[in-house]
Amino acid sequence: MSRLRWAVVAQARSHCSRSASRGKRRSTPKDVRKDNQELLSKPPVAKKKTYTRCIHGVRWDDPYHWMSNVRDPYVREHLELENLYADSVMASTSALQYQLRKEMACRIVGDESSPPERWGPWLYYARIPSDKDYPVYLRRHLTHGHRSWFQKLKSNAAKFLKETQNDFSEQKLLDMNELVKEHGFAHLGVCKVSKDHRLLAYTLDLIGTEVFTLFIKDIDTDVTTVQYRVFKHTLNSKGDDILLYEDKDPQNFVDVSKTKDWQFFTINSNSKTSSEVYLLEAEGSKRDLKLVERRRPGVEYFVEHQHGNLFLLTNAELHKKHRVGSIYRLFLCPVDDLRLENWKQIVLEEHNCIIYDMDIFENYLVLFQRKGGLPQLSVLKLPIHLDMVEKVCPDILPLPKGVCSIAAGLNQDYSSSILRLCVSSPVMPDALLDYNLSSKEYVILQQDKVAVNAVKSSCQQDHDVHELLESKDLKSNASQQVFDLSDIYACEQLRVPSFDMVEVPLTVVYSRSLKVEGKNPAFMTGYGAYGESLDMKWCSDHLSLLDRGWVLAFAHVRGGGELGKAWHDSGRLSRKVNSMRDFLACGEYLVKSGFAHKDWLTAKGVSAGGLLVAATTNMQPDLFRAVILKVPFLDIGNTMLDESLALTVSEYEEWGHPEKKETFDYIQSYTPYDNVKKDTQYPHMLVLSSFLDTRVGYWEAAKWVARLREYNKANVERLVLLKTDMNSGHFTESGRYLHIEGSRCCWDIKIPNQFQWPNAVSEKGALFHAEGQHKGGYSNTHVRMDSFKSLEMLLDHISPWSSCDVDS
């Protein structure tokens, strides 16, 4: 539902702390480096301090609790020693790191512009200059009398901008490169233009702690002002601001938005599982807030307005006493009489199909759906009269074959009949489409240009691949055929029976040259929390794995949103362990079905996905050979007992409140930190954390690593590495080149007589050893892979929530 919510411009209760200020990167003191140089060949030993907790009559020791004290000077020293140790281990693959960085960088297009999107008399677009990391946001004024912009864009968007540059006056709205240069760090939250196109409102996090500051800029004068709270305020006035709304419940997040027709402002108060929306007329004399529907536990709803009616997307069951449904339904209601008896359902539910979002135009309503876990688009012709709702039938919009992910564009122009979309899949580079809702036809404006270079770069010896590429019609705008790599790579969605025979979707991607006979290394990722879906997006970096014989797998476990709200509910609270058991079933399936060698299965989890992977590893430590945990949520037991932490209270609806004994006992049964097994061989571990993270404390990763080493001292064959970024938060901001430069390499491949890959992996770091024939053009291949190092770099971009702000 994220597109329905505009921006968190309320100050609104910030749980984040500014106590750790961001400045110049702090290096490790010389004396620490010198005194501990001889220790870099072995992992640091964390000291233990007595700390005992007691709740519900249960007492337990937490000797690493001291790590959560950011003021303890030994904390930073310990983390810096961990970084030095990890760097010393990873140094053995420096030559391969360079090779892989070079390989990935060659896939990046130099000067890159997005096709413009029209809103009124302006075209808005973004450009990344060839020598820059970050986008510049721009606009141009469309001269009156100019030939139809849509027809121009049909042929070639870039050519359109170039040919008409004399007809436009380009204005720079925001340059992220300048902001990063000025502040050292800048993360853009939201960026919105006022109805009259005069003001730009945007929010920036300048520290990395997700504390956003609202800026309002006069585009013409380039004057910027700053506000920290949301009140009723008249710009340039000196009168006192009027407080319109205050929500004192720490579980709720307040944001301010507007309906797309600009008739109402909306104040939205959302918890993890419930909603409350107020309307405020944008114009006219009425300035009172109007409540749409009071908050009810478990009931969420989102609104849009058109011609005196509200469209409501909600999971409410209007005709059942408990009132909480397992799917979202679309209702219509007159804005002048919002009583529940006036809510009319206008789209009946369809088997195996869910609605998860909507967008509205003057003459059309677009529904974003998933059918069988895959995206689908439907459109309704507007207006819809209340006495005709039973006869409404949405039209399904055709999509390019194989689409696994849909991301909507800005689509700010309410009067337009054009819907901007970005579609992709693991084997389809991002393609920008303009959908004509009237004709139900789409135009391909632009498609990621890196695909051809990427494949040619990483498959230099594969003549079959070259022939396939040459046979493709790459002129997408002319042929209206979306280019994909499905002839080279397979992308399949399978159904895996879990422990209770519930079928779990599992997406696998692999080279068609591979034989599925149990001889391949495989990488599996999962998330399974907050009802967020693990979208299958394009990432060119994956080619470096696929072309080396890896199988990529995405486990859509319970707790996610792929199959609707019921799928989320079956993997949260007292049913959270379903997520882990689903992930376990998917891993075992990859081995049993021949997608993965039993000793070559690796996994990665980010944030709440780190909880998933770590808890699964505790359940069955021998399932994975290597594991990567990035900003992982590992100490859920202690975190959910500490209400002073940023998100604890708001997370009760996802994990439960441990003040209740049954909830406490259940959380303790799976929390990774308190369930590490003793004298057990765990996988190789690479654990990545961020010191300024306000969502998941850095100490959760540090405590996990310390306990793993303490409980398994004799297990010297397995590496456990901890890397802490001392200058970033939960969502590390990086440019398109910086993410490559700052990454670490993961494996060592030596191919005699073809590629001279450096044999630089130490004996301890060599996780995999295999000999065999690579059918993609390589022969007599000797492979040595330091898996977790490679996966940090090559798979760091498999984050399923790149545009989402929902996390642990």
Image: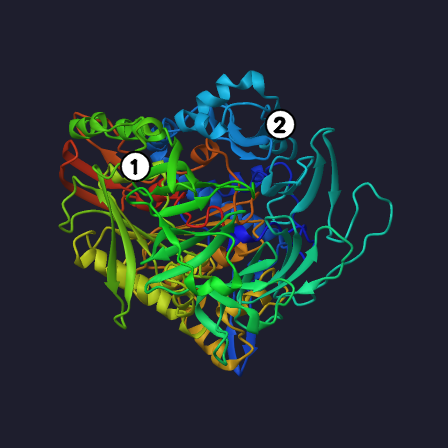
* SS type, badge 2: strand
Query: Nearest the camera: 331 or 548?
Result: 331
Q: Which residue is mark 2?
A: 172
Mark 2 or mark 1: which is in front?
Answer: 2
319 lies above or below 163: below
Residue 330 is situated, as x and y percent measured from the top left of the image, at 48, 62
What's under tag 1, amino acid-wise? Leu
In the drawing, what numbered circle is on residue 364? none
Q: Position of residue 786 (x, y in %)?
A: 30, 43
Residue 434 x, y percent position in the rendering:
43, 37
Mark 2: amino acid: Lys
Residue visible at 44% across and 45% down? Answer: 407
* Residue ID for mark 1: 543
Q: Residue placed at 64% from the left, 65% from the top?
A: 250
Q: Is residue 449 above or below residue 724?
A: above
Q: Quadrant of residue 224?
A: top right
Residue 107 placement: quadrant: top left
